[in-house]
Image (tube, rainbow, N blue to C red):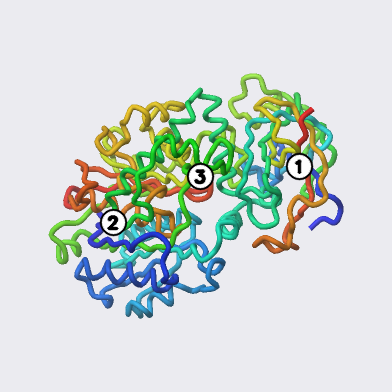
Amino acid sequence: MTVCIIGASMTDFGRRDAWIRELLAEAGSDCLDRAGVSPKAVDHLLVSNMASGEFEGQTGIMNALAHDLGVPPAYAQRIDQTSASGGAGVYAAWQSIASGASEMTLLVGGEKMTHRNTSAATDVIASITHPVEYKHGLTLPSFAGLAARLYLDTYDAPRESLARVAVKNHANGIDNPHAQFRKEITVEEAMESPVVADPLRLYDFCPITDGSAALLFCSEDVAREYADEYVDIAGVAGATDTHVVHERTDPTTMAAVAEGGARAYERSGYGPEDVDVAELHDMFTILEFLQLEGLGFAETGRAWETTENGRTERDGALPVNTSGGLKSKGHPLGASGVAQVYELVEQLLGKAGARQVDAEVGLACNVGGFGNCVTMTIVEPGGRR
Amino acid sequence: MTNGPARLKAARCPDGHYHHPPHPRCPDCGAKPTERIDLSDREAVIVTWTTVTATPPGVRKPNHLAIVEFDLGDRGDADGTDDEGDGDPGNGDDADGANGGGAEDDSENGTVRAIGGLTTDDAAIGDRVRPVYVERLREPEAGIREPDSQEWDGYRFEPI
């Protein structure tokens, strides 16, 4: 069965006064309105979120949201796959429709983070690590520093090439009205920003963000009842890699990205050469390189050249992170994978405004931890399958 | 949790895969590990390293961190069998599989990696290091993790 997306929304990302319940309700309600679907038509409500209990002391948010949106007696479930919770929600939503268990599934992803200072928020996220990592003070940025040093050393890549990722994604974010940072930066500024995890600097990292995004899923028959234009899920898949990062044979390759990508390509019938626009998980600039390589968009050790050549810019052959990416749009953990697909829906339906590129096939890669788990979604305009 | 000082141990499964930290099942083949190998008195080589200046509560700042690799040679000297020690640790056949040299799976060539702090930022990829015991690596009470849920002592790595 072809599974379609007939509604998409996202809140403004950034420092928000709203708490998690309010953020989720804002995106969920807006998504239903945009699709012209009543809350009472929702069979399944899925909520992608990593850590509302740890950040805010609010648990059971799927039930809170179900009540706030007026969807009971719909089935409701929370989905945690750390920072890949949003992509995992897309996968679960696809399963709910494809299995016939649900006719209409609303997915809402969100996170409320900015009320915690950087050190405390970093610790909440670092709680995903193994005890042998946590006791040494390992954080996600630490893994990025370790991988970046080895990548630059192994492939003789210039440090500036990582800065180019940040510059590109900031340039894209200027045209995204929902982005946290709508500000141009230069390679020089990035190279002079404070060191966070040597050789990576402040501008190599995404910010801490509040925000929410939502998608509405149904079968093609139901989609035609509600919408003139919609998006089809061509393929969705996920995979895992080692939890303990140092146990990987090569810290500069992402096995779960390659495996999840291969599965999504196989299910969709598309390959990397067919993808016109991609949203990659640029939580750190180095991750954009590793995903470009893992997904077959660049040869191993060559993504830095692909980036320097301008291929991934908005007017390049493969625009990457037209939304601004996590880097400039922001990274409210559970929302990010949902917001990636929101951007692809806008692009495929020609609604991306100044960010618009010519695209028929879009790919989103959502990464949890430093590649512990990955979910991949490939979408295309509706009615093709 | 164990009461004595944390030990830097690798697990070896009957198929010759080494892992640190030990897991209930071998991440490569799913078998139950049968041996433990002490790494704390061995030298290692820095695979990569970083100095982190934005550290979480209770962690030293700056925090120098490294992934290091121990070369166990043709096979590590096992110093004890696992709890599920129903395998055959003396099986000489394993030595071939663990002897590197063209094996496709790196974990079979007698190397195992660990992560930990560095005692200095004067480090480079390829430098040799040795483990140095540290009684308290970070303040257990300061972070989000339940203090009683894990060990807080362990080993940092000192360039030789």
Callout 3: helix, strand or loop?
A: helix
Question: What amino acid is labelled 3 in the image?
Answer: Leu
Q: Classify 10 Å Cα crowding around label 3: few (below 14), some (14-19), many (20 and above).
A: some
Question: What amino acid is labelled 2 in the image?
Answer: Pro
- Give the distance between the C-alpha atoms of the residues marked 3 and 2, in whole angstroms: 23 Å
Tell me the subunit letter for badge 2: A
Q: Nearer the viewer, mark 1 or mark 3?
A: 3
Q: Residue at x 51, y 34 (%)?
A: A253
Q: Nearer the viewer, residue B89 or B137?
A: B137
Q: Which residue is mark 3?
A: A202
Question: What amino acid is labelled 1 in the image?
Answer: Thr
| Side of A72 where B113 appears, left or right | right
- Give the image location of residue A298, x and y in percent: 38, 29
Tell me the subunit letter for badge 1: B
Q: Which residue is mark 2?
A: A177
- Give the image location of residue B8, x and y in percent: 78, 42
| Side of A81 where A356 appears, left or right | left
Q: Classify 10 Å Cα crowding around label 1: few (below 14), some (14-19), many (20 and above).
A: many
| Side of A307 where B45 appears, left or right | right
Task: Say if mark 3 contacts mark 2, CB within 8 Å.
Answer: no
User: Does any portion of residue A277 appear in the rendered image?
Assistant: yes
Are the residues flagged by discs 3 and 2 from a single subunit? Answer: yes
Quarter that holds the N terminus of chain A = bottom left
- On screen, residue A161 above or below A281: above
| Side of A197 where A176 appears, left or right | left
- Give the distance between the C-alpha atoms of the residues marked 2 and 1, in whole angstroms: 57 Å
Q: Which residue is mark 1?
A: B34
Tell me the subunit letter for badge 3: A
- Give the image location of residue A318, x and y in percent: 29, 35
Q: Classify 10 Å Cα crowding around label 2: few (below 14), some (14-19), many (20 and above).
A: some
